[in-house]
Image (cartoon, coloured by chain):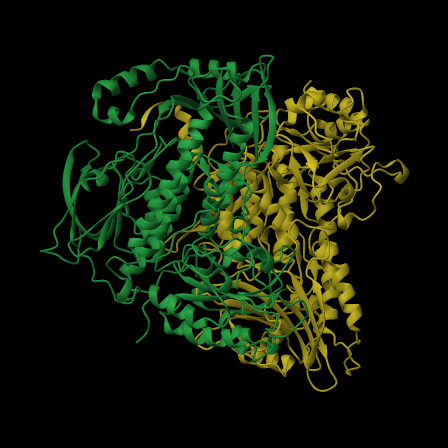
Chain colours: A green, B yellow
Amino acid sequence: MPVFTEVASSYRDLRILPSRAPALPKLKAPSTSPPGQFEVVVIGAGPSGLLLTLLLARYGIESLVCFDAKPGTLKAGQADGLQPRTLEVLKSLGIADEILQDGCHMSEVAFWNPVPTPGIERTAFVPDVNVAARYKHEVTIHQGRIERILKENLDQYAAENTLRFSHRFISFEFQEADNPEFPIVVKVESTGPDGSTVENTYRTKYLVGADGAHSGVRQNMGLKLEGETTDHIWGVVDFVADTDFPDIRKRCAIHSSTGSVMVIPRERIATGEYLTRLYVQVADDINLDLDNACENSAVVKDLRQKRAAITLEYILNQATRVLAPYKIDVKNGTTVDWWAAYQIGQRMTPKSSASDRDGVDRVFIVGDACHTHSPKAGQGMNVSMMDSYNLSWKLAHTLHNLIPPTTNSGKNSILKTFEYERLNVARQLIAFDSKFSSMFSGQIGGEDSSVKALTHEEFVSVFREGSGFTSGCGIEYGDSVLVKNSRDRNSSPVTGSDPLSGTLQAGRRLLDVKVRRYADANLRHLQDDFPSTGRYRILVLASDDLLNPSGVSAVALTNLCDIIPQFPSSMVELVVLHPLKERFEWTDLPPALKKHCEMRFYGCVDDNAYQVYGVPEASGALVTVRPDGVVGMIDHLAAYGAVQSYLAGCLVMHS
Amino acid sequence: MPVFTEVASSYRDLRILPSRAPALPKLKAPSTSPPGQFEVVVIGAGPSGLLLTLLLARYGIESLVCFDAKPGTLKAGQADGLQPRTLEVLKSLGIADEILQDGCHMSEVAFWNPVPTPGIERTAFVPDVNVAARYKHEVTIHQGRIERILKENLDQYAAENTLRFSHRFISFEFQEADNPEFPIVVKVESTGPDGSTVENTYRTKYLVGADGAHSGVRQNMGLKLEGETTDHIWGVVDFVADTDFPDIRKRCAIHSSTGSVMVIPRERIATGEYLTRLYVQVADDINLDLDNACENSAVVKDLRQKRAAITLEYILNQATRVLAPYKIDVKNGTTVDWWAAYQIGQRMTPKSSASDRDGVDRVFIVGDACHTHSPKAGQGMNVSMMDSYNLSWKLAHTLHNLIPPTTNSGKNSILKTFEYERLNVARQLIAFDSKFSSMFSGQIGGEDSSVKALTHEEFVSVFREGSGFTSGCGIEYGDSVLVKNSRDRNSSPVTGSDPLSGTLQAGRRLLDVKVRRYADANLRHLQDDFPSTGRYRILVLASDDLLNPSGVSAVALTNLCDIIPQFPSSMVELVVLHPLKERFEWTDLPPALKKHCEMRFYGCVDDNAYQVYGVPEASGALVTVRPDGVVGMIDHLAAYGAVQSYLAGCLVMHS
């Protein structure tokens, strides 16, 4: 007979719930916003708007709303690709599991080229991801599914009415005079269930336009998407394929003498079958000046007519022509999931923020509102979401009064780094996409002299070299208050020189490595100690004299543990790696270590972290990591004062 | 300007939802159950009852209800350990992610023993899991959280009112005469919000008691928990520890001259702190006859009084005495999460099923209703859930008329294998727990002659040898219609002899191996092609002459592809491994392969699957795997006829 008596604390029952990310501390209680006044208003509930709203809610912004003109969750989205870096970020938010489990993993790319006897042949297999990354593949999955996951997570963090559909943005303007704390007036038209519309006026501290290529926020800022590059007309179709083409489950770049096709394998669907996406170049190229098209409705009409001639049948027939002698068809008993014809140029805005009369950035645009481009490199949703990821913690730190006066406003403010960092990425995106698209539309080894013939090697080399950018893992932010690059290579604690393989580099994201935790011998991913909770971290790569109480590592750790409490509680976390092979006890270590990071203290495993990061075990290094996982600065173990200075530029200190 | 036209099919919008496991086919439409009549009634919504209900719902049983006397989701559960095999099963249901992400991973065990100078010393670190497994650790996490995850998944699959709290089981009886299709009458008392009670009568085809150690269903079957072993009195406490004991984040078995303590590290909680569980042996042993205690209220009363003397203070003080010279205390500013005192013997039922007048098993008990034992080996919740896992698909196949007449009822019926297989596990559980508990309560190297002194080596050896059982990965089911062991070792296609390392063995679960999919070059876990959807699978380990169209592999594959359609649609799936190192094309392979398993065809990676499974690449093997991932039979590639015979015993064939 079981004999049992027990006593439980009441809060124990809460532990059945999913884990929550901790909100940021608020240094000044926000004035309770009266109805209609928000700390942040987000326009647009696509991937970038949803992610931004979610991140702000997770960081603890309670007075928050996201308006979208659509009547409900997006159903028309066609983006489907998630880059390795986006996957790392979703993982750092604890929302990558379903995507990784059910999405299609693209591990390899097959290149197919024409052969003299009519037909095509496979020229090479190349890994899809050519840089070091936690996930060595991209994932393709329905955009609507990603939005559903973001929305479900938002429901866990935000107040009930945060996401408001059927609310169309009309305009914003600054009215600092009558309400300087909430200086922006936003007009929004809501549509009731009966179709009647009401115009509402809200006030907000910050406004973010995530409202797509036709962004009303951007137009209200007086900005246009600019650029002159154009793209060929392409058809795109999602379907279950019946084919003898051997590489249908791999990403393929196919050039034949009759045109180009890109194969994008997609996820398994409920029937147990697998979707395939084909991008099919429309053979009869139309090269119109899209810049004029924007202004000239006759040209737009002409374009529309030409596109109207492109049918599903045409797309599938053209795919068959390119893939010949292989056959490809819609699988019997299935219907085509989705298809479209498009012609998109590479265009971007010259600015992505607007400031109030004091020069404080108050209005921002993210995602397609800033940059449009062809979908072939699978970048759109990723760059858009990463815009939001970059902006969100800077906004939250500002709103929570966590930023010191020196960098709180003005030219060197932390908020200014958003435009600086992300417009630079948009520029690279536009440049890469122009190159990739036009190369892809060109013929390889073709006879047509009107198109510049490319060698297969040139194409593969553009693909490989672009991997740093297209994977998202090679993005590098320039110097600012948030990124301090050591000018002098000789004085750097880092000896490696290959940041794409993991060498530490200020401005680039910290690569994941596998490590073994000292306290519990668990094998862990180091990136899991850098979750996206809006905190800064100091990563100490201890030197091999860690056990020496007066060694440089012990001194650094002791001093860092004094520095950390000078900043707002919980805002700076300590993570420590050691290179020691011998066994040791807690009592052999600086006492500060166990006290501050008992569960964030690691030894190395096979892919030695020191080697990957380019740090000699004899000398070690101090690495400051921003809330978005980007390395802010790297210095020698003795330079803990420099860490303090860096952090003092980012975070307010206790007086 | 983006120029875009698109056409989408309406069902595309459904693809935003989470993936669902496909229900089993139903060979005869079930007669629509009138209100109050169910295909299955489950009593008890603990881990085993919830998992059973969830599995039945996922398999497609719609007429289903689960009653629990409690007013809401369980809050009193104290089990916290999940074995590697349980994790594999949860993964196969797609519900392991949160548990793996947020639970505490126990990777290593530390053994501590007395030293002559008063105190203790660490004698050894041993891996927590000593057998091959997909997860090389256990996970500890609050039982209530596991139940919440099961319940949330149930909400996705079952009708709204499937789970009914405040419904207390009263009794059941067979009344075959007036309603032979629903022969069991179940009486349940429901309590309304106002406290009023109503007695309801339901009818069901099958009844399962998952109603715990005091199971009413078991009592109604006339069964008792039997057994004579007793356990010492132990205290258990969950709290945030403040300690200088170095191994507090590892599982520890600590023997000192003043008693024994087991440390179980627990998950991180919302405060960012980590829980610790301690099992503390109560020094003043009480050895009462628990068998008599059941019958004798005076003895029970005496026990209760003795336990009442055990306070939280006593438990913590005793822990401090055992751990001395290390200090351990409740962390300042935190309160103890939960504590209890218990004394549980090892007891089990002699039977776990009851049959109707035709000998058809109709009533079953699972979990604690069948077996109780001490919690120290972390088995309870696991063995209980695996009872349900074993029963669920057998019940669903029976209800969906998927079982052939020969094994549908009677002594050799598939339903009979539930009791045969799981009572045997319960027996091993009781035996192991008796041994482990009494060894653990004994002193190592102690002076006390009343307790048999153990050597440290004996204890570690029991721990290690028990790993096959305690991990759940070494469970082996005996011969039956579902498990066909080749009698003749010489004729076996398997050359290895170490099933705990992965050697194929009928009756044991198929070990996970990493493999690379041919179609898309993805690195995958083979177990992910054996999801718990209630289907049988044939795993072909092709021989190295696979490319020879008249070789044994090609012939086997072609024949298997003819055999599979003889069984109900979707009920038998084909998975194929190949050992080839050279590159080849789909056209080099038997055409049946691409047609039947384009996305379930794999090559080997580093931990060569053939070697792990003990199958020579030159000869290959055919492996039939049951819906629960257990190998049903293994034979030579030429023996596809034996596969057909095996399946014909499990599944009805098209006439």
User: Position of A376 compared to A134: left or right?
Assistant: left
Q: Nearer the viewer, residue B132 or B589?
A: B589
Q: Nearer the viewer, residue B580 or B600?
A: B580
Whether residue B200 is visible, yes or no, is no
- x then y, percent, for residue B241: 53, 73
A381 lies above or below A116: below
Task: Find the residue positioned furthest to the bottom.
Answer: B117
Q: How many marks?
A: 0
Q: Nearer the viewer, residue B240 or B147?
A: B240
- x then y, percent, for residue B512: 68, 44
- x then y, percent, for residue A613: 55, 57
- x then y, percent, for residue A87: 48, 45
The quadrant the C terminus of chain B occupies is top right
Whether residue A260 is visible, yes or no, is yes
- Quadrant in the rendering for residue A457: top right
Residue at 85% from the left image edge and 37% from the top image edge: B492
Residue at 45% from the left image edge and 52% from the top image edge: A508
The quadrant the N terminus of chain B occupies is top left
User: Position of A423 compared to B570: left or right?
Assistant: left
